[in-house]
Amino acid sequence: MIDRTLGWPGGWRQAGREVRSSVTGVDWRFRSLVVAHAVSAYGTYLNLIALSLFSYEVTGTALGVGAVMAVRLLSGVAAGLAAGAVTARVTRRTVMVVTDLAQTLAMVVLALGARDVSPGVLLGAVLVLGAGNTLFNVALRSAVPVMVGQESRARANGVLVTARSVATVLGFASAAPVIALGGFGVAFAVNGASFAVSAAAVLALRPRTDADGEAGPAGATSPPPAPAGTGEPTAADEPAGAGEPADGERPEAVTARGEGRGAVTARGEGRGAVTARGEGRGAVAARGGWLGRHLVGLAGPLLGLIALRGLDALASASHNVALPLAAGAAEPSEPALFMTRFWSAWAVGTLLAHQVLKRRTHGTTWGERAFAAGTCAMSLCFVAAFTGPPAPALIAAALAAGFADGWTEIVYTSRLQAAPDRQRDRLFGLSATAEQSGFALGTITAAAALETLPALAVVGVFHGAAVCGAVALLLTVRTHRARGTTDRSPTGAPAPPSGDKGEDTHGTSTGAGRLPGS
C-alpha cells in the first residue's frame, strides 16, 4: 500500500513506515499546522473585541462601528464567491501564505498607527482581514483531504474544531487584560504576530495541499495525471466514497444514460465531455450565468446543506447579540462571569464532540441527516440557555450546545470534503458566502428586534427558523433518495434519461444514488 496523502523525501513512502499519531490518526505535520493555525485563531478572536472597541474610538458613533463590521463581512462574502476562481489559478498553499502575510501587514499598519488612524485606513485594514480570513479558511478546509487522506478527514476536522474552540476561549478571555495593559497597539501587534506564525508554519512544513501533481513537502510529487483523453481519474483526484455508482457498477462504466465517473461517452469523450444531450459543465454554466457557474453539478441535498449552514449562521448571530443582554439580566453585578461560564462550557462541549466522533469507524462520516439533527439539537440547547435557568442548568445547556456545535462543524466540513478535489473550493466558497451573509443579516435583524422584544423571544424565533430549515433538509434528502429508488427498473438498472438527472463530471452524483459521506 502506497501513502498518497503526503509527499516525503525519496518519493512515495510505504504506509507501514508512516509517522502517524496513535491518538489523532493524523500526521504530525498536520497537527503542527493546526497548532500554528490555532495561534492565528487566538489572535483573531482577541482582535474581534479589540477591533470593535477601536472602531468606536476612531469613528465615534455606533453607526461607524456597524459600517466597519459591514465592510469586514461583505469583503468575506465577496472573497467566498471568488475563492473557487482564485484557487484554480494558484495553489491552496500559496493562498494560505499570501492571505496570512496580507493580514500581518494590515495589523502592523494598525498597530503602528493606533494613536492616529484615519477611518479610511481602518476600513482598508478591515477589508483585508475579512477577505483574507475567508480565503484562508476555504483553502485550508479544501486541502484537508489532500493533507491527511480522505479516510482521516473527520479526525482532522475534529482536531481543527478543538483548536478553534480553545483559541476562542483564550482569545476572548485575554482581550480585556491585553488591551488594559498595552492598549490597542499591543492587541493589534499580537494578532499580526499570530498571522506571521501561521504563514511561517505553512512555509516551513510545506504541506501538499493540491492533488494535481504539485510537489510535496520535500519535493516529492503526487501521482501523475491520467493520459489526456482517457477520462480516468487519478487516485489523488477522486475521494474515497465520492460518487460511488450503485449496484456495484465500475466507476469507468458507461451506463444506459451515458453517465459514470468521468465516463467515456458513446463518442469516446472523457471528463468534461459533452453528454448525450449535448450539454457539459461549460454549456450549463454559460446558460445559467453566474449562478450556473457556481451551482452546476451540485446535488439538491448538498445545496440544501449549504443553505442550512447559512440559516444556522443567522440563528447563531441572534444568541451572540443577545447573550450580553441575558448576562446583564441574570447577573447584573458580574455579567462577565456569566459569559465566561457559558463560553467555557460551550468550548468543553466542542472538545467532547471531537472525542466522540474520532472513535467512529476510520474513514466514515455522517452526512446531511446527521447535520440536520445536530442543528436541531444545537438550536434547542441555545434556546434553553435563554430561559433563565439556574447556573448548573445553564452550564449543562451550554455544554450540550457546544457538543452539537462541534458535531455539526465536523460532520458538515467532512461532508463537503467528500467532494472531488477541485469541486471542494467551489463548495467551501459558497459555504463561506452563505455563512457570512447569514451572520450579517442575523446580526442586523436580531439587534433591531432586541430593541422591542425580550432576548428569549428573539433567540427562539431565529433558532426556530434553523430547526424548520433542518426539517426541510431532512425531507429533501428523503425525497431525493426515494426518487433515486423509483427511477430504477425492476432489475436494478438505471432508468432511461429523464432530462433532469446526471452526474457531475468529477463524480458527485446529482441524481439517483448514494451521496458521498451520507
Image: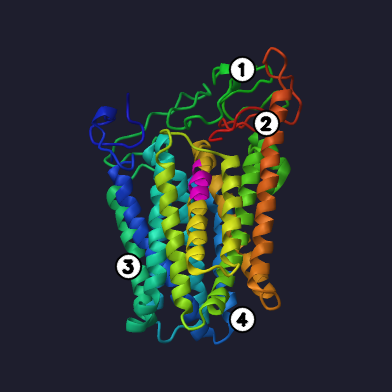
How crowded is the residue under tag 1: few (<14 C-alpha within 10 Å), some, or many (20+)?
some
How crowded is the residue under tag 4: few (<14 C-alpha within 10 Å), some, or many (20+)?
few
Is residue 253 toward the left or the right of residue 198 in the image?
Answer: right
The disc, 3 or 4, on the residue closer to the chain's N-terminal end is 4
Q: Residue at x 50, y 23 (%)?
A: 232
- The mark found on residue 193 in the picture is 3
How crowded is the residue under tag 2: few (<14 C-alpha within 10 Å), some, or many (20+)?
some
The disc, 2 or 4, on the residue closer to the chain's N-terminal end is 4
Is residue 508 toward the left or the right of residue 339 in the image?
Answer: right
The residue identified by callout 2 is 481
- Residue 492, position as x, y percentages in the image: 67, 15
**Quadrant including the C terminus:** top right
Q: Is 289 located above or below residue 421 in the figure?
A: below
Q: Residue furthest right?
A: 498
Q: Residue furthest top?
A: 491
- Quick one: 280 or 474, which is closer to the camera? 474
Q: Is 177 located above or below residue 349 in the figure?
A: below
Check if residue 395 falls in the magenta segment: no
Disc 3 marks which amino acid? Ala
The disc, 1 or 4, on the residue closer to the chain's N-terminal end is 4
The residue identified by callout 4 is 63
